Amino acid sequence: MTNRDEWQPSMFGIEGMSRGEIVQVLVHYFTESLGRTWTVDELLLHPSDAARFCQDARFKAGWFDMPDDFVLYIVKTGVAASRGELHGSSVSH
Protein backbone atom coordinates (compact mmCIF):
# COMPACT_ATOMS: atom_id res chain seq x y z
CA MET A 1 0.00 0.00 0.00
CA THR A 2 1.20 3.48 -0.83
CA ASN A 3 1.71 6.06 1.87
CA ARG A 4 -1.09 8.54 1.34
CA ASP A 5 1.32 11.48 1.73
CA GLU A 6 3.27 10.20 -1.28
CA TRP A 7 0.42 9.95 -3.79
CA GLN A 8 0.94 11.12 -7.35
CA PRO A 9 -1.74 12.01 -9.92
CA SER A 10 -0.47 9.33 -12.28
CA MET A 11 -1.41 6.66 -9.69
CA PHE A 12 -5.03 7.41 -10.59
CA GLY A 13 -4.58 7.87 -14.32
CA ILE A 14 -4.59 11.66 -14.02
CA GLU A 15 -2.25 13.43 -16.40
CA GLY A 16 -1.61 17.15 -16.83
CA MET A 17 -2.58 18.19 -13.28
CA SER A 18 -0.44 18.77 -10.23
CA ARG A 19 -1.21 17.44 -6.77
CA GLY A 20 -2.14 20.97 -5.71
CA GLU A 21 -4.63 21.33 -8.55
CA ILE A 22 -6.27 18.03 -7.64
CA VAL A 23 -6.50 19.09 -4.00
CA GLN A 24 -8.11 22.38 -5.06
CA VAL A 25 -10.69 20.60 -7.22
CA LEU A 26 -11.68 18.14 -4.49
CA VAL A 27 -11.75 20.74 -1.70
CA HIS A 28 -13.83 23.07 -3.87
CA TYR A 29 -16.27 20.26 -4.66
CA PHE A 30 -16.55 19.37 -0.96
CA THR A 31 -17.10 23.01 0.01
CA GLU A 32 -19.73 23.53 -2.65
CA SER A 33 -21.60 20.27 -2.06
CA LEU A 34 -21.35 19.63 1.70
CA GLY A 35 -18.94 22.04 3.35
CA ARG A 36 -21.54 24.62 4.22
CA THR A 37 -23.43 22.17 6.43
CA TRP A 38 -20.91 19.47 7.38
CA THR A 39 -17.26 19.33 8.27
CA VAL A 40 -15.08 16.60 6.78
CA ASP A 41 -15.06 14.86 10.17
CA GLU A 42 -18.87 14.86 10.20
CA LEU A 43 -18.91 13.37 6.70
CA LEU A 44 -16.62 10.58 7.88
CA LEU A 45 -19.17 9.67 10.56
CA HIS A 46 -21.71 8.90 7.80
CA PRO A 47 -20.14 6.15 5.66
CA SER A 48 -22.90 5.91 3.08
CA ASP A 49 -22.86 9.68 2.54
CA ALA A 50 -19.04 9.64 2.37
CA ALA A 51 -19.15 6.88 -0.26
CA ARG A 52 -21.73 8.83 -2.26
CA PHE A 53 -19.62 12.00 -2.02
CA CYS A 54 -16.58 10.09 -3.32
CA GLN A 55 -18.57 8.58 -6.16
CA ASP A 56 -19.98 11.98 -7.13
CA ALA A 57 -16.55 13.64 -6.91
CA ARG A 58 -14.98 10.94 -9.11
CA PHE A 59 -17.80 11.22 -11.65
CA LYS A 60 -17.66 15.01 -11.73
CA ALA A 61 -13.87 15.10 -12.17
CA GLY A 62 -13.61 11.98 -14.34
CA TRP A 63 -11.04 10.43 -11.98
CA PHE A 64 -12.56 6.96 -11.92
CA ASP A 65 -9.42 5.21 -10.62
CA MET A 66 -9.12 7.23 -7.38
CA PRO A 67 -10.31 5.11 -4.43
CA ASP A 68 -12.56 6.51 -1.71
CA ASP A 69 -9.83 6.53 0.94
CA PHE A 70 -7.67 8.82 -1.21
CA VAL A 71 -10.57 11.13 -2.10
CA LEU A 72 -11.42 11.52 1.60
CA TYR A 73 -7.78 11.84 2.66
CA ILE A 74 -7.10 14.53 0.05
CA VAL A 75 -10.23 16.46 1.04
CA LYS A 76 -9.55 16.15 4.76
CA THR A 77 -5.92 17.26 4.53
CA GLY A 78 -6.71 19.89 1.89
CA VAL A 79 -9.40 21.52 4.03
CA ALA A 80 -7.11 21.42 7.07
CA ALA A 81 -4.25 22.97 5.08
CA SER A 82 -6.49 25.74 3.75
CA ARG A 83 -7.40 26.61 7.32
CA GLY A 84 -3.81 26.44 8.54
CA GLU A 85 -4.58 23.41 10.71
CA LEU A 86 -2.26 20.93 9.01
CA HIS A 87 1.17 20.21 10.46
CA GLY A 88 3.66 17.73 9.04
CA SER A 89 1.78 16.56 5.95
CA SER A 90 2.63 17.31 2.35
CA VAL A 91 -0.70 16.94 0.59
CA SER A 92 -0.13 19.48 -2.20
CA HIS A 93 3.45 19.05 -3.44
Image: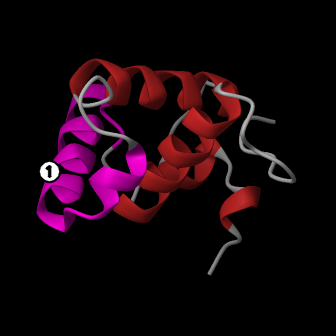
Q: Position of residue 7 (x, y in %)?
A: 68, 55
- Answer with left or right where residue 69 lies relative to residue 9: left
Looking at the image, residue 47 lies above or below residue 72: below
- Answer with left or right where residue 69 lies relative to residue 24: left
**Picture quarter with the N terminus:** bottom right
Give the residue pinned by disc 1.
52
In the image, the segment drawn in magenta is 40-63
In the rendered picture of this protein, how many numbered marks are placed on residues?
1
Q: Is residue 18 visible?
A: no
- Name the residue rendered at 27%, 64% in the picture: 45
Q: As shown in the figure, which amino acid type bears the numbered disc 1?
A: Arg
- Name the residue rendered at 61%, 22% in the picture: 21
- Answer with left or right where residue 23 lies relative to residue 6: left
Q: Position of residue 70 (x, y in %)?
A: 49, 57
**Picture quarter with the C terminus:** top right
**Magenta stretch secondary structure, dominant:** helix
Q: Position of residue 69 (x, y in %)?
A: 43, 64
Residue 32 within the magenta-colored segment of the rendering = no
- Name the residue rendered at 28%, 40% in the picture: 58
Q: Position of residue 85 (x, y in %)?
A: 72, 39
